[in-house]
Image (cartoon, coloured by chain):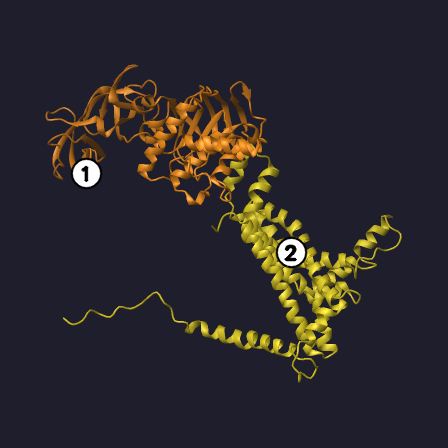
Chain colours: A yellow, B orange
Amino acid sequence: MGAAPATRDVTSYGMGLAAPLALFFLVFFVAPLLQLLWLSLHNDTAALHWGLGQYLHFLTDPFSLSVLGSTLLLGAEVTAVCLVLGFPIAWLYQRVGPKLQTIIILIVLLPLLTSVVVRTFAWIVILGRQGIINATLQSLGIIDTPLKLLYTQFGVVIALAQVQMPLMTLPLITALGRIDPNLDDASCSLGAGSWRTFFRVVLPLSLPGVIAGCTLTYAAAITAFITQSLIGGGQMLFMPMYLYQQASTLQNWPFASAISIIFLLAVLAVVSVFTTLGRLSRGYGGT
Amino acid sequence: MAEMQGGRSLVVDAVTHRYPSGALAVENINLDIKGGEIIALLGPSGCGKTTLLRIIAGFIAQTQGRIIIGDDIVDALPPNKRAVGIVFQNYALFPHLTVSDNVGYGLAARGIDKATRQREAQRLLELVQLPTMSERLPRQLSGGQQQRVALARALAIKPSILLLDEPFAALDKNLRLDMQIEIKRLQRVSGITTLIVTHDQEEALSMADRVAVLSHGKLEQFGSPSDVYDRPQTLFVNTFVGSSNRMPGVVVSADRTAAKVRLDAGAEIIARPAGGTLSEGGRVTVCIRPEHLQFVGDETGFAGVVGMSLPLGATVVHEVTTADGFGVKVSQARIGETRALESGAAVRLAPLAPSLANAFPATL
């Protein structure tokens, strides 16, 4: 007969199906980001004169730098609290029966099921001058005057930690679930106590989850506009509120854009440090 | 490498374990294991053998009974104080540690310094014939190599008892035989009392000095491989260990050493009363192994029709349907002219010898 039938490459897929999403990202993410960058490169509020003035202003202004510093520190504190409190929950989850697992998951997910505004107001009720904590401590006679809990760094960290906890706990639960339970028994049968097993086996093997949880928690904590503002109040200023003031109140869009870009770069830097740490400490997976 | 330690004895004394739900996992298990013996715990899945292994290791606290290692009752000791080495079915090597660190892990837990640990790890890796693998990660090794590492890791702590949980299940057939020989060699060298949990009867029979057969949490028989294979005490042991044809029949006459049984298939044979004495006229189940049946030319034995013949290499297995409708298998060594029989051929069968048929009182 004639020529052999033409062969078809069945391993490549058409990119057409990805086009809608690509277009969506292009219009609603890449374009605004480029516009932000374009705006930030102007020295005047009317965006007529090109220049790096806004960046110079931010990087030489002690106030702006202190806002950036306190925001990054806030993120670190929230992440640390979430890790220390979240790890035991994730660890417990892997060691209880299916019924308790359901309850734990429900408790972990519950914060995600209520509005962040509602959760934050709940913390105001708890932390306020006449709030639950102060009222209890006063009625027990432990303190005479109410403690200042609201509008403090402590208050913001606690409230944010509760709000962002699921972002830490869920990756940890996944990571711990991937660890072969026989490793625990193996470690134990070789004479290791529970702490050695935890630090030599469980913790190193859960690092991918720790890194993922820390990255998510950190990114969420430093950008949590509502909780930061409501619990922090007027005296505590963090980057999202600073940005909002510059853009909305002062109408200084180029400076607000420059703040955004600097903030974005700062977050990316921290996240890449996390990722690098994760890659270095993960003895397996690479090589 | 002389490493004779003279293994310690292990006594499982009337151990019973109930799950929290109340179901019995193991019931009144008694095993008296001498130092240096290899014992196989053999049974189908769910028979309680893994539970028993975990009780000995200390991961499960038994409801009743005692575990005695050497002269010590170890029930109060947690697993990390029992010095029981375990090789897990999936090896459970630490994936983030090198082979050397895996082997040295137990020594590190005992506070031994790094240099000594590495030297000892290297010595053990040479013992399991992996001297050049010390810096690799477990996932860079083959299944057999991983098992050798797991073995070296368990031996590193100089355990008084070595427990192997389904050690060969994950290996392919050729490698399995190599590892069985290897483990038997290492066990001989070290003299460590060894317990192998397995559902594979060939493995149990070939490796163990004595075999404990378990079923539904109960110990069915504990004896040498030939005891278990040739002189099974229960119907379960007879059918689980090796393959066996089960043929129903009625006792014609019986004393303590022999019973005359009329098979429903239509022949009178002499069988060994295996499960205690049999009463005349009682229903029995007679077990005859396929290799203990032979074709006979005369009118002795029982009649059957050949269904299918399977030439399986060294043997040929014939499937024969008897007059009462039961299917029996006959295994013939393949010598010279042994050929597959025609389907539908009429044959007569008889046991090779009276002692090779076992009669058990019929349950039901």
Helix, strand or loop for disc 1? strand
Find residue B90 and report its horizontal and vertical position in percent: 44, 40
Residues A256 and B135: in front is B135
Q: Residue furthest right?
A: A144
Work out whether residue A241 can be spotted: no
Numbered disc 2: secondary structure: helix
Identify which amino acid the numbered label 2 is placed on. Answer: Met
Amino acid type of the residue tagged 1 in the rendering: Leu
Of the two numbered discs 2 and 1 in the rendering, the one whose residue sits closer to the viewer:
2
Name the spot of residue B355 as percent of width and height, x first.
25, 19
Can you tell which quarter of the image residue A148 is in?
bottom right
The residue pinned by badge 1 equals: B310
- Is residue B131 visible to us here? yes
- Circle 2 marks a residue in which chain? A
Expressed as whole percent of the image width and height from the top left, the position of residue A38 reads 61, 78
Closest to the observer, A137 or B94: B94
Q: Residue at x 31, y 67 (%)?
A: A9
Q: Which residue shows up at 84% across the image and 55% down it? A: A147
Q: Tell me how far mark 2 sits from mark 1, CA to CA.
A: 65 Å
Residue at the disc numbered 2: A165
